[in-house]
Amino acid sequence: MTYLAVPIQTQTYDQAVKAMEQAISRGAELLELRLDNMTEPSVELVRRLVTAARRLNRPIIATCRPMWEGGNFAGSEKERKLLLEEAVKVGADYIDVELAGLNDLDCEKLNAKLIISSHDFKSMPADLLNLLDEINLYQPAAAKIAYTARRITDSFAGLDILHTEASAGRVALVLAMGPAGIITRLLAKKLGGFLTFAALEESAETAAGQITIEEMKRLYRWDAINSETKVYGVIGCPVGHSMSPAIHNAAFDETGYNGLYLPFLVGASREEFYRFIDEIRRRNWLDIKGLSITIPHKLNALNYIEDHNGRLEELAHKIGAVNTLLFEEDGQISGFNTDYAGALETITQATGMQVSDMKGLNASIIGAGGVARALAAGLTDAGAEVTIYNRTIEKAKTLAEEFGCKWYSINDLKNISSRLVINCSSIGMHPQEEATPIPKEYLRQEMVVFDTVYNPMETMLLRDAREVGAKTIDGVSMFVNQAAIQFEMFTGAQPPVKRMAEVVRAALSKI
């Protein structure tokens, strides 16, 4: 069993009891009592704390981390040993002691299950395997290594240890701290780690990158994870703001699919992207089957496919961007772009048209960035007559010439006459909600106005269009549809589109 453990790091007994009860109510499977955080730690206080914890019927780790190992205990080693001895005496299941302090604590006489730990709060130790071997010489109940991941590829050394130790029947706990190391926390259960830590709430984390227990249970489906779980995720930089984990994990939950969707924080360079993909392809046991790609890696993903003789969707090549990777059973990697498909699906749903009906459709696109490229490629491929408007006329011209479109400056919007008008720029996006790419007086009732911005859900452009009687399409629909297409690619199952839309709209309503 891999425990979902919650550290209790309060200053007083009453605070600790309240925190423990909250942790249990939220699904904690193990409690770690951080004795070093107590204002005045004493033998009597430890006795009361452990006794109270035992009444909650969960395994208990007693930890009294010294300042020299990143903790808060400023007393002597003799005083620290007395506290740990008392914790064992009154029923703590485990005590966490530092490798560097084993001799001073004389742990053989503590008569408890030892978690022997080592922490590096600056970087990753040069040789984790030697460190692990050194810890295992003492035959602990569990070996614990926590280190700081400066980049996501630093996490693979920790994942390797979890995999090999579980395969050998040993128990290990390896955590890469920091945003780049979150995947070691989320994959611990799949790989058979001893436990993973989750904070009681956002303000109560005991290490960088620690996720709350609510996120672990609800967002990342902790209870559904097992060794057979298939892994998916989104690659981006930054990636913490992405709603993709929420939408895909909710879809897995709704359909009963045994999947887990993670955020992968991959540095912005091409080299970092290539190295990350190479690392996961070497590790079939991670069961990473598919990835979503977001800014700034869509071009890197396309280049990787081409450089590694992968399979590339023709229109993705034409767009010049890949937002979906699939890892095939034959070892091949395939790249697709679901942005254009999601947009076309959104348009057809809203208008009742079929893609075949778009032949000859007069459409205008505002913007000349990545989303505009996807829309221009998809619409022209369907036979629409497209005009590009952009603030920088040279960018509009370059994009238009590539796809056989007309182009104008955004200052020429007074002449816009298209039936379908699509904003692919960032104008009107949070926090500039009062901006619009098209003045209201240029909008007409016969238009279909589509804004790909989804935060806010109703932009000023959409409000203005609705007021003049035009049909409107919001950006949430496109985001959901492109994700739904990815879900079907990932799983082969019909996507629960209604549930996916509910998740996105609920998340956006809280922003």
Image (tube, rainbow, N blue to C red):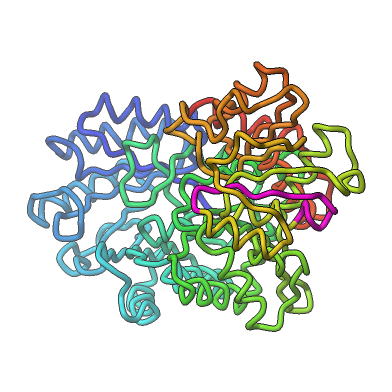
Residue 37: image quadrant is: top left
Does any portion of residue 188 appear in the rendered image?
no
Looking at the rendering, the stretch of residues picked out in magenta corresponds to 378-392
* Left or right of residue 490: residue 511: left
* Left or right of residue 507: residue 250: right
* Left or right of residue 140: residue 41: left
Q: Position of residue 260 (x, y in %)?
A: 64, 52
Residue 1: image quadrant is: bottom right
Q: Position of residue 370 (x, y in %)?
A: 59, 56
Q: Position of residue 4 (x, y in %)?
A: 49, 46
The residue depicted at 76 percent of the width and 39 percent of the height is 346
Does any portion of residue 96 appear in the rendered image?
yes
Q: Position of residue 85 (x, y in %)?
A: 23, 50
- Count of picture labels: 0
Figure check: 265 above or below 249: below
Residue situated in front as seen by the camera: 157 or 431: 431
Is residue 393 one of those drawn in magenta?
no
Residue situated in front as seen by the camera: 107 or 224: 224
The residue depicted at 33 percent of the width and 27 percent of the height is 17
* Left or right of residue 121: residue 139: right
Residue situated in front as seen by the camera: 500 or 417: 417
The residue depicted at 44 percent of the width and 40 percent of the height is 212
